Amino acid sequence: AGAALDAIRRVDRPAPASQLHVPRVARPWTFRLRWSGRDAETPGLIASGIAYYDVYVQAGKGRRRLLAKTSRTSRVFHGRRGRRYMFTVVAVDNAGNREGYSDRSATRVAP
């Protein structure tokens, strides 16, 4: 019975949450994106932890594309002068729960 209860406590259903930090205006063309995340424990359950992050970029009015699938929490981005970029990060935990698309963060690369 104890083993069954322990197995139930390890079922992780809630999705993780992430937060993205980007400069509002980037003066050099190359800048660093940073993000963080957490897979919060709910009372009586054990969180599985974050497995990786999907980092997306959208240039101007173009389509959003996957920039990276990584377990790291930062990445250098090479922009082009005068362009505006929208970034989104999505956390995925070890149980396979995927965060919904979070708020996007915008960066403009200064001329």
Image: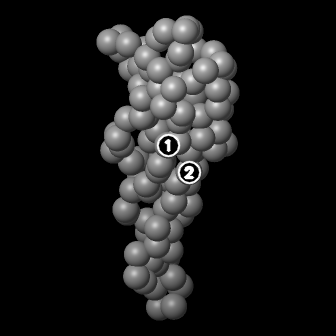
Q: Name the residue: 46% across, 67% down.
A: 40
**Is 51 left or right of 84, judged from the image as shown?**
right
- The disc at residue 36 is 2
Q: Amino acid at mark 2?
A: Ser
- Vertical placement of 69 versus 61: above or below? below
Residues at marks 2 and 1, CA–CA distance in whole angstroms: 7 Å
Please indicate, yes or no, whether residue 73 appears anywhere in the rendered image: yes
Of residues 45 and 84, the one drawn nearer to the viewer in this rendering? 84
Q: Amino acid at mark 1?
A: Leu
- The disc at residue 30 is none
Q: Secondary structure at mark 1?
A: strand
**Image position, residue 81 (x, y; %):** 55, 8
**Image position, residue 21 (x, y; %):** 52, 42
Q: Name the residue: 43% across, 17% down.
A: 84
**Label 1 near label 2: C-beta < 8 Å?**
no
Please indicate, yes or no, whether residue 94 appears anywhere in the rendered image: no
Q: Which residue is mark 1?
A: 20
The quarter of the displayed image where residue 111 is located = top right
| Disc with the residue nearer the chain's start (2 vs 1) | 1
**Is 29 left or right of 55, judged from the image as shown?**
right
**Image position, residue 42 (x, y; %):** 40, 75
Density class for disc 1 (Cα within 10 Å; few <14, some 14-19, many ≥20) is many
Q: Name the residue: 49% across, 43% down.
A: 20
Of residues 86 and 66, the one drawn nearer to the viewer in this rendering? 86
